[in-house]
Amino acid sequence: MVTGPTSEHDRAVHWSSVYERSRPDAVSWYQREPTVSLELVESLGLEPGTAVVDVGGGASPLLRALLERGFADITVLDIVEAALELSRSAVGDDPRAHWMVGDVLTWDPPRRYGLWHDRAVLHFFTGEEVLAYRRVLDAALSPGGTVILATFAPDGPEQCSGLPVTRYGAEELTKMLGDDFELVAEREEDHSTPGGALQRFTWVAARRSGGAPTA
Ligand SMILES: C[S@@+](CC[C@H](N)C(=O)[O-])C[C@H]1O[C@@H](n2cnc3c(N)ncnc32)[C@H](O)[C@@H]1O
């Protein structure tokens, strides 16, 4: 049975080696445009003033795309510094972009955000790790804030980057978020990997109760 890394150190070592082995546009999760993320951001009417955190954002093109759309406060959190260097080199030293090296399971968010975005990170966690993820999300997200989550779907792959994943449908993701959250949108996506495989993803957007976002 394949098991995932169980400590912050091992998670960092694992993901660093993934970035060392592959070119950024050759990793299975690579996408030229963050199409579904942008579609959800637009359909939810998120204002460019919304503070965004992209957890496990790595070298994702979402940062550049949101900057192009006028978003003025975007933080990319990732456990691999080299991934954040790729992100930084893609947009340059833009004062609207912030990069933080950290493990989302132990992260102490310095402030609150109006949008928590996670594409293909949560599904690597199991058991206690999911509880830790939820605690960090709770601390980081503003009252009334929005989450956008994408994981492998129930008929998606069972592994990614050499690690087992937990596959979710929209209902399971919403249940994982708990009663404080209301589902506002859901999507299914067939992601084409650079190697030509298709990976089915589940996407949800959910809003936390508590009034207008303040971040
Ligand atoms: C499958 S990739 C997805 C990257 C990005 N979200 C995207 O859609 O292009 C997973 C990313 O999460 C990062 N990561 C994995 N475990 C993490 C953790 N515990 N805390 C923060 N980042 C993590 C990896 O370094 C990698 O950049």
Image: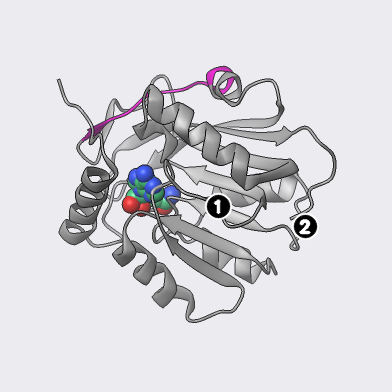
In this rendering, position of residue 41 left or right of residue 108: right
Q: Circle 1 is placed at which residue position?
A: 109
Q: Is residue 4 above or below residue 19?
A: above
Residue range in magenta is 163-172
Residue sitting nearer the eye, 51 or 204:
51
Q: Nearer the viewer, mark 2 or mark 1?
A: 1
Report the amino acid beneath label 1.
Pro
Residue 151 position in % (x across, y down): 45, 33
Instruction: Answer whether residue 160 is visible to the viewer in this image.
Output: yes
* Secondary structure under the numbered disc 1 in the rendered image: loop
- Numbered disc total: 2
Q: Is residue 52 above or below residue 121?
A: below
In this rendering, position of residue 190 left or right of residue 140: left
Residue 59 position in % (x across, y down): 39, 61
Report the amino acid beneath label 2.
Glu
Q: CA distance from mark 2 to mark 1?
A: 22 Å
Picture quarter containing residue 148?
A: top right
Please name the residue shown 56% across and 47% down the image. 117
Picture quarter containing residue 111?
A: bottom right
> Looking at the rendering, in which quadrant would you find the N terminus?
top left
* Secondary structure under the numbered disc 2 in the rendered image: loop
Label of residue 47 in the image: 2
Please name the residue shown 49% across and 60% down the image. 76
Give neighbour class at mark 2: few <14, some 14-19, many 20+ (Cα, 10 Å): some
> Looking at the rendering, in which quadrant would you find the C terminus?
bottom right
Please name the residue shown 29% across and 44% down the image. 8
Q: Say how the picture is coloured.
A: one colour
Picture quarter containing residue 123?
A: top left
Labels 2 and 1 touching (C-beta < 8 A): no
Residue 153 position in % (x across, y down): 44, 25
Q: Is residue 166 magenta?
A: yes
